[in-house]
Amino acid sequence: MPTKRPTTKPEQRAATIAKLIAVARVQFAEHGYAHAATEQIVQLAGVTRGALYHYFDSKEGLFRAVVAEIQRDLAQRIISATESISDPWQQLLVGCRAFLSASLDRDIQRIGLLDGPAILGWEAWRKLDAENSMRLLESSIQQLADSSIIAPASVTAATHLLSGAMNEAVLWIAQAAEPQQALEATIVVLEQLLRGLRQD
Amino acid sequence: MPTKRPTTKPEQRAATIAKLIAVARVQFAEHGYAHAATEQIVQLAGVTRGALYHYFDSKEGLFRAVVAEIQRDLAQRIISATESISDPWQQLLVGCRAFLSASLDRDIQRIGLLDGPAILGWEAWRKLDAENSMRLLESSIQQLADSSIIAPASVTAATHLLSGAMNEAVLWIAQAAEPQQALEATIVVLEQLLRGLRQD
DNA sequence: TGACAAACATACAGCATGTATGTATAGTGT
DNA sequence: ACACTATACATACATGCTGTATGTTTGTCA
């Protein structure tokens, strides 16, 4: 019988790191970064703070890892929803919908949208976002521009505006009395706004 | 000679509160909420932490007061820029430009846009925003809709999308290599997007 | 198989918030 | 004019949390 529980060092390392990140994700989402105590996190992970500081240089470092994981998850969900769509315009709209739906998770909102920028700083946070979901948005817009379907004065500016619009929309939808209705309204208005970028 | 320095109680009260808020605004902007020590704030304000906790229930309470002040300042600047404009469409555009320009202040970015939502929670922060700059945006959009100049599927959704778009745009513009250029590009794209809401 | 380093655990120092309590002074009634 | 009260603070302390320094166990590899 092979490893009952991981006993080799690389395995142990990976397991502990993964456990810490998983537990931290829940704690950060539940209490927010500031009120999530590292002691509580390591207890729930079955280790001590010594382990935490062995793998991460600080509480913020652990948080950064959690944010990165969340960003990757989110991007993956968008990719899954859009990869089978060929029409670029539809792809953008479906991508936007996927982003809005996926972001209704409390984890993503609290960690990815609220605490993320405040704790990591806007530039560091934006960098993580730019490597994931924002990258998808930008390439989608770029593709539409290349195909002369839309003609934004600046692809970069358009990407930031739309990204910000959706980040705010997510938080609004999440606390709306009727989220489903709010989500549909958001998508319709988003489509209207995008229409303005179209070539006439 | 009247009051050399304020000696009456209401005066003292107002003076101390104002001083604390003013100093706190600088400290919060410079170091961020988490790394701004109350001890440092009260020292620079010429009082002790006893005074702070006499007027505010917590550090967060002081922060809330600072955010409220910033929101009022921002709204006032937008009003000043737009009050003389009668055409509602131009009023909206000028208002957006005023918002983007004014928000280039580090105070507003760090306190109003980054730490604000994270510390106060999105709903509380949104409430403060909704009473100020967002209210201006919404009434402007509502007016255009009432005049049948635009026809957004939902005024509320449109307001949130545009508000979020600009909040993000501000942070992007601020750190852009050429902020002035980024600002102009943003406004042009914003205008394009708004065109999509127009009645055809 | 014994040295060596990784993977933790433990103990401690430092700082920051919040609270409890003390004190001086403006206001107020008589 | 004087005692009294409440406001406007100051001081002292308890608590909680992060980060660091150091100790201990256990794979790994020559």
Image (cartoon, coloured by chain):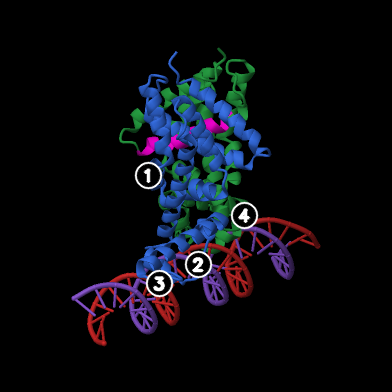
Chain colours: A blue, B green, C red, D purple
Q: Label 3, label 4: how many angstroms apart (C-alpha)? A: 70 Å
The answer to whether residue B18 is visible is no
Location of residue A101 with respect to B50 vertically, above or below? above
Q: Label 1, label 2: how many angstroms apart (C-alpha)? A: 29 Å
Location of residue B16 with respect to B150 vertically, above or below? below
Q: Are marks 3 and 4 on the same chain?
A: no
Q: Which disc, if any, is residue A127? A: 1
Which SS class for mark 4? helix
Give the camera-side residue of A163 and A122: A163
Q: Which disc, if any, is residue A45? A: 2
In magenta segment, residue A18: no
- The residue located at (68%, 37%) in the rendering is A178
Q: Residues within 10 Å of mark 2 (few under 14, many from 20)?
A: some
Name the image quarter holding residue A58.
bottom left
Which SS class for mark 1? helix
The answer to whether residue A6 is visible is yes
Q: Nearer the viewer, mark 1 or mark 2?
A: 2
Q: Please name the amino acid that badge 4 sits on.
A: Lys
User: Sequence order check: which comes first, mark 3 or mark 2?
Assistant: 3
Q: State the residue position of label 3.
A: A7
Q: Residue A79: give x, y in percent of width and height.
A: 45, 39
Q: Residue B65: give x, y in percent of width and height.
A: 56, 48
Q: Label 1, label 4: how many angstroms apart (C-alpha)? A: 51 Å
Chain name for mark 3: A
Q: What secondary structure predominates along the stretch shown in magenta?
A: helix
Left or right of A179 on screen, residue A51: left
In magenta segment, residue B172: yes
Q: Please name the amino acid that badge 2 sits on.
A: Ala
User: What's the magenta region?
Assistant: B158-175
Q: Please name the amino acid that badge 3 sits on.
A: Thr
Q: Residues within 10 Å of mark 1 (few under 14, many from 20)?
A: few
Q: Are marks 1 and 2 on the same chain?
A: yes
